[in-house]
Image (cartoon, helix red, strand yellow):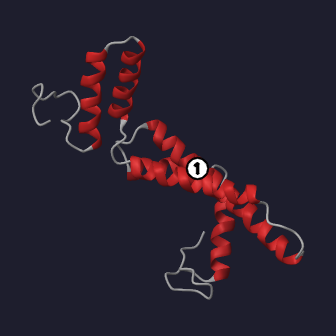
Amino acid sequence: MKKPTEHPGKLGFTVEAREALDLIADLLERPDPGADGERNIRDLYPDAAEECIRASAFHLYRELPRALVELLVDIELSLREPKRRIDQGKLWHVLYHVQNSSQLESLMPWYREDFATELDAAIEAMESDDREFVVVTLRKLKKIGCGRNSPTGIDEAEGEGE
């Protein structure tokens, strides 16, 4: 795989159109783009929850490229056969993976393992009707989400900084 150039091409790409097609071919020929994507995401967000990393890699690196290719093929076929309609399911498939990838990207910086653990604890407390534990846990989750939580294992004095 050669390194892409960083200049606008004919189609407004950051690379020439032919080079873009070569990069796309490289991506589609990867044996496991999902696993490669997981490694990339882990490097970018080392504290992110494992479930977020896996889901993000699934949507962005594994499924979105396939969905985009299917849509592009459908668009070209519709241009070759003018009475052929574009399959809206293929368009929605792309949007589904874009939406999920975008949501996960926004969660990644703060949805860490400690958040997932606290969320599981809150669910269990709700199921067992332990209202006090639910309130305490939701306060912890709020701190985590706002970036105001202490490092793991160090509890602040109850009620402080709320």
Rendered location of residue 52, percent (x, y): 46, 41
Residue 150, quarter of picture: top left
Rendered location of residue 35, percent (x, y): 57, 46
Rendered location of residue 119, percent (x, y): 37, 28
Q: Residues within 10 Å of mark 1 (few under 14, many from 20)?
A: many
Q: Residue at x 75, y 61 (%)?
A: 70
Residue 69, quarter of picture: bottom right
Identify the residue under disc 1.
59
Furthest residue toward bottom: 10
Horizontally, is 10 left or right of 8 in the view?
right
Q: Residue at x 57, y 56 (%)?
A: 98
Q: Residue at x 54, y 76 (%)?
A: 4
Horizontally, is 129 left or right of 18 in the view?
left
Furthest residue toward top: 128
**Of residues 42 and 54, which is closer to you in this image?**
54
- Height in image: 138 above or below 55? above
The quarter of the rendered structure image containing the N terminus is bottom right
Residue 112, quarter of picture: top left
- Height in image: 6 above or below 98? below
- Height in image: 79 above or below 139? below
Q: Amino acid at mark 1?
A: His
**Of residues 65 and 34, which is closer to you in this image?**
65
The number of numbered discs placed on residues in the rendered structure image is 1
The quarter of the rendered structure image containing the C terminus is top left
Q: Secondary structure at mark 1?
A: helix
**Of residues 120 and 150, which is closer to you in this image?**
120
Rendered location of residue 40, percent (x, y): 47, 53
